[in-house]
Image (cartoon, rainbow, N blue to C red):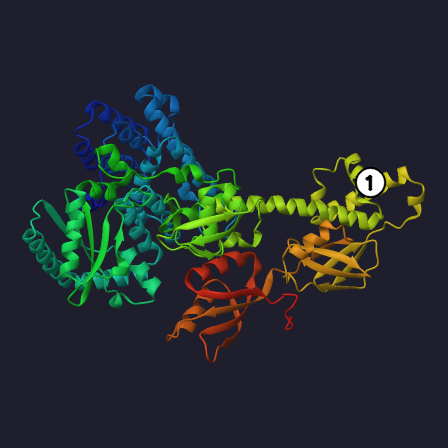
Amino acid sequence: MDNFTNFIDSIKEIKSVEEAKNTLFELSSNFNKEKIEKAVNFAVQAHKNQYRKSGEEYVIHPILVASITSFFSDNEDMIIAALLHDVVEDTKYEFKDILLNFGACVAHLVEGLTKITDIRAHSLLPSDIVDEKLTKSALTFRNMLISSIKDIRVLVIKLCDRLHNMLTLDALRIDKQKRISEETMLVYAPIAHRLGIAALKKYLEDLSFKYLLPDEYQKIDEYIKSHKESFILKLNEFIDTVELLLRQNGLRDFEIKGRIKHYYSIYLKMQRKGITIEEVLDLLAIRIIVKEKLECYECLGIIHLNFRPLISRFKDYISVPKENGYQTLHTNVFAKNKIIEVQLRTFDMHKNAEFGIAAHWKYKLDTAMPNTKWLDNLMYDEKVEDFYELAKNDLFSEDILIFSPKFDTFTLPIGAIALDFAYAVHTDMGDNAKEAYINKEKATLLTELKNGDIVKIITADKPIPRCSWIDSLKTSRAKYNARHLCNQKIKEVEKDVALNILKTIFDIDIIKLKAFIKANRLCNSIYKLSEERNFFIDVVKKIEKTLNRKSFVDLFKNHKIKEYKFDRIRVLSNKHVNEIDFSFCCHPKMGDEIVGFLENKKVTIHHKLCSSAVNLIKSNKDMVFVEWIKEDHIGKYLIVVNLQNKKGELAKFATELAKLGVEVLSIELGVNSDFCKVEVDLDEKKLDKIANKLKQHYAIVEFSSKKDAYNKNKK
């Protein structure tokens, strides 16, 4: 178990097929030797004359992937599938060859791995890449998760495959190194975390970190190496003191392990707190491993009685395990001038924490099983690119534990709001939620939840769409269902808007109009009229023909549609329009979905889902077709950001804007506050990416278009 680091170090040095074989045979000595040798020989033959970018024989890769897999599992079929995982994809052999030679189970696993396809060829991160590449990458990601629903072993083999790819990344071009590291950091490491396989997760994170941010990695590496001797001395001193205290209090059968935290976790702490590595106080940690659960709490008492604890940092994951099955007590204590993290767990918990779901195949553990329901709960019927964004959001997050009033537990990502919880309980509860009680105090559904909160949701009789809240939701389940409800609501509103626009043009009542729409077989598509200009004109012509056939009088009515332009708004109507106005009740901004109401030759613009507008629509007020006039993609925006009152923060923010391709036009600093107003030019195609990137690292108070209809300083 604890030799995983040494094992990976030895894997890095293997350059020949014979060395790779010896490593695998040593690890798989308990398996059927003939079957393993047969699979190795099959892989060697299949990959004959194939080489990697490094110049090494290709077959070394699957043999070492099988070796890593065998470290996690004693499942013979998994080892053989790992050996053959590239055979169908990259050689002349087919599934029938695997089936005939190695049986149905191995063939099933290889099929699952082959369906994943070569994710390495595509980038998953940048939103400004070619759409086709993003689609392929997202599809690959979805296939990987779908294959894993059928058999979770597929996902574990794929993680081992990715680890070996990361270990041999030096042979590739720098751009490929970064691309593969990006997808590893955003997809594979979080999946390893979800499956509770900490040993894999830490390696994947640190290796990705090394290629993505080499300067930051090097600074941490140099600092740790230059201080390693003093760190080890401090750890050993602390371990000796703790060991003596435990023995004095009657504990005998235990182990204490010291460690320096892994590089990426150190980097994250530096980023979260805005500090340098010299200012990180808790670089050191020890792990006390005992036989029984009760002894974990006994040790905790001894530690807290002899060292001053940071109570706010105490966590009990034994009584309330994480969703991935992780069980350990966490506490931080002061030891001289250092803060040292202390983890307490049983030997079974230690195996579970390091190898997660894989440990349950290898040992009979008295621990919680990782919860894999998240695989089933992902919304696979979403548009593939949206699915990727939603699923990635779920994977790449730390968890908090929330309780229902009956003390059922729900795991949600950090930053989740009360409405996320409502959807986690049940879709109907989320759709109908109207208010929340958090720890028995009334709160809005937008309230961010904290670990351990008890949440009660009050529901209404009917669903309540909250389209403007979707970006505030954190879980893919909540986003998907809120969007679905919102789309239903929008479709209903758009249908009513279409009827009102046609009623205004033809001066006929709604009942008669619906008959004409039915006669032209437009019932299922009429909602599109308020959004699509060509469709609108086409429908007007069809209704006009129907009217002319039905009534001689209508031949003399003017149904010709005229176009009116007002700055950034286009109006289409057969009625006279002299001016437009923007409603102050909903404050529509450039790009928002809008509707227009006609009264006395003036059109008033509302946001489509504005409550006042919805009431006017329901009362069948006269309406016209309105849309924004599209301009070039470069737009002026105002960013209001709350910067820390620290030297260099503004320069750091300006540098970040430059990296994102944002041109700064002006900066206005707050005299008596930390608020800073920055006017910028940016490519509106990249708007969402830029906004999301900034919000990850800065407290963005406002991010609005200077084309806002209410902005007096229009440019």
How many numbered marks does the figure carry? 1
The picture quadrant where one finds residue 290 is: top left
In the image, is residue 601 above or below residue 167?
below
Image-based side of 616 in relation to 285, left or right: right
Residue at (40, 38) in percent of width and height = 375
Residue 508 visible in the snapshot:
yes
In the image, is residue 664 above or below residue 524?
below
Where is residue 702? Give x, y as percent.
52, 66
Image-based side of 634 in relation to 261, left or right: right
Amino acid type, residue under disc 1 in the picture: Lys
Which residue is at the front of the view, 605 or 204? 605
Where is residue 394? Give x, y as percent.
42, 47
Q: Which residue is the site of mark 1?
A: 512
Which residue sits furthest top?
100
Residue at (76, 50) in percent of width and height = 620
Where is residue 217? Give x, y as percent.
29, 59
Where is residue 434? Give x, y as percent.
53, 51
Placement of the C terminus among the 4 image quadrants? bottom right
Image-based side of 637 in relation to 95, left or right: right
Which residue is at the front of the view, 40 or 370? 370
The picture quadrant where one finds residue 699 is: bottom left
Image-based side of 246 in relation to 589, left or right: left
Residue at (26, 68) in percent of width and height = 279
Which residue sits furthest bottom?
671
